[in-house]
Image (cartoon, coloured by chain):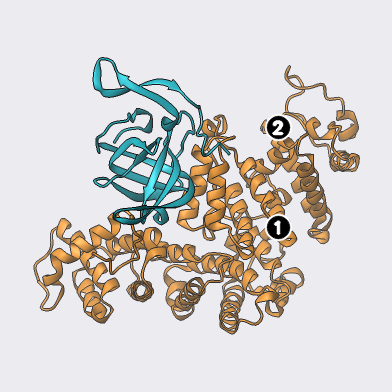
Chain colours: A orange, B cyan
Amino acid sequence: MASILMLIASHEAENQTELSLRQAFELLQPKLKPPFSLAIPNPEEYSQLNHAILYGILCEPHLAKTHIKHLHAIVTDGYCSFIDLLIKVVDGLYVKLLDSVKRQLIWVSKEMIDVSAVGLGNLLVCLLRQIVGGDFSDSNLWLCSEVLNIFSTKWGCLLEEEPMILASALYTYLRLLADHCRSIHNHNTKLEALKRLEIEFCVRVLKEEFHLCLKIGRDLVRLLQDLVHVPEFRAIWKDLILNPGNFKTPGFSDISQLYCTRTPSSFFSLQITPEMEAQLRFLLTHVKLGSQKRHQSWFTKKFLCGPERETLIIDIVRFICCAHHPPNEIIRSEVIPRWAVIGWLLKSCTQNHVEANVKLALFYDWLFFNDKLDNIMNLEPAILLMVNSIPRYIDMTHTLLDFLFLLVDNYDVDRNDLIVKGVSSSFSMLVKQGVIHSLDVLTSCDVLFPFLRERLLSLFSDRKVKVYKDLDSPQSPQPLGLQHCSGV
Amino acid sequence: MISVKDIVPAAQNNISTQFILLEKGKQTTTTTTEGHNKACLALVADETAAVHFQFWGDECDAFEPGDIIRLSNGIFSYSRNNLVLRAGKRGKVEKVGEFTMTFVETPNMSEIRWIPDPNNSKKYMQEAIVSAHSRIFPPK
């Protein structure tokens, strides 16, 4: 039987979520029209009724209003079960859903906002996660626009019930705007209209609810800097730098406060679809180093095909650094390490602006590292990629180290002290925690460009930073360069 | 459900297993008395072994490398001198997932020479390994 919920390819196994919804609907169909039963359902019946009503709403648009009234009449758990089911459908089936079903999904999500359903925020996060960066297909732009419409029309309600969801939406749409504002898309009128609405929404959150934006932390700056060429954001950028008081947010007096706030890891999942997340986590948990080629090429074919899709690599690298921290048993195993996956992703970049942003994503936490607030696992992939590329892939070490010093010198010249401190404490912490044994591996590396070695040494010459893990430890190499580099 | 390493040639449709599709070869069209038929040889594998799989008819276009496939009631036997696993007329192949499965490319069950078991003429046993890896789809 053809599904009226989703597209099923030939030879595709039955989907359990779809099956459970359809079976409940078929079983309870006679009870889904008025007059509704007044009997109180037992927990099993309640669950089945939720399944059946959701299937009815999604597959019978003409009866959706009857079904939702029925739901309002029977609900006893603040819509918790219903939202859980909706999340299952969005996370597991969204891509395959028929267009009419997708429209119903958006409609019922708005209904859930109107009744302040329990778990509403999670549902909206799931919808945001289905929007794909670098994807200019009609169906993706449709979803961008529909979800944006939810946030714009339900603004007041969301601000009251789930304020942080507005920060998540801001993160998503700033990221999407970086794609949508690229000049090559100027002639697409549909996109142009969407872009205007996206800008309007982001500016509204930034201007009216800046206290929420602060919770995003440093990645807010990273996203905003990609949009400084857009007049609306240039104005906001100026205020951030010159007139922080304009945001009328008590306690906010300088952009460095954003720099010094680590972005919560939940934000990094927003640009990664659940399917992409499952594949990345599988790669980083099960696939052995040396036999990853086929998995890598399948991943590329599915998610990174086409020049526009390449910008996704920036989000993936940020996700791997900040939201996928493997336990020690994985780190010690033969499984492909994070640095190797990032090395592969960096090598897949064909456009300079993407490559630069990927490197920025990789080093971003280095620039503002504070050992009391930040996690060393966010720094680990970059150092290991640099160190493990010696000597065979020394070009990689060169390009990364060179980029890091470029950031130190230029990222924010007015707050250079902060960045120098961040980068030097990153290095010392990586040594102290034993991620690398000592900086000798870079500073005494014959194949490394001398000017990079000198830059490294001078980074420490002004500061008495302890760059050796344990001078007494027998495994420690003799700290030959120490007098020279610490200035003592 | 059995592991790929445990499949043995037999004239029976009784193999149920699950594997990931690694690579598809060129499609061929054969003309029989029943009309034209597409076929496509492929390399599939699970955590224990690899094997050559023959897709037939519309199966050829329904699966892509990286697909996780469940075979029910398949058969492992010689088809034009190639030892291949296939669904056959009574078996079924279904896509159950993508990507999230590990695999090995050696041993390859199609690259093993089998001889009748002297103790049980209905059964086959391994005689020799012809090649550790697939000679049709060499490792990448």
Left or right? Give the position of A12 relative to A287.
left
Q: Position of residue A37 (x, y in %)?
A: 9, 71
Q: Quadrant of the C terminus of chain A?
A: top right
Report the residue at 73% width, 36% height from top. Answer: A387
**Front: mark 2 or 1:** 1
Residue reaching furthest front?
Answer: B33
Cα separation between marks 2 and 1: 30 Å
Q: Position of residue A241 (x, y in %)?
A: 75, 69
User: Would you identify the image quadrant in which residue A307 lies?
Assistant: bottom right
Q: Is residue A76 visible?
A: no
SS for callout 2: loop
Q: Amino acid at mark 2?
A: Ile
Q: Residue at x 12, y 78 (%)?
A: A34
Q: Could you tell me which residue is drawn at 46 percent across and 54 percent down?
A: A275
Mark closer to the chain start, 2 or 1? 1
Q: Is residue A301 above or below residue A184?
A: above
- Above or below A159: residue A405: above
| Few, some or many residues within 10 Å of mark 2 (<14, 14–19, 20+) | many
Q: For the view shown, which residue lies furthest in the top direction?
A: B119
What residue sits right under mark 2 in the picture? A436
Q: Position of residue A58 (x, y in %)?
A: 29, 71
* Rendered image: mark on residue A350: 1
- Asked whether, in this view, residue A198 is left or right of residue B9, the answer is right
Compared with A297, A229 (above or below) is below
Is A75 in front, or is A344?
Answer: A344
Which quadrant holds the N terminus of chain A?
bottom left
> Please, what secondary structure does the residue beneath circle 1 have?
loop
Residue type, label 1: Thr
Q: Chain of mark 2?
A: A
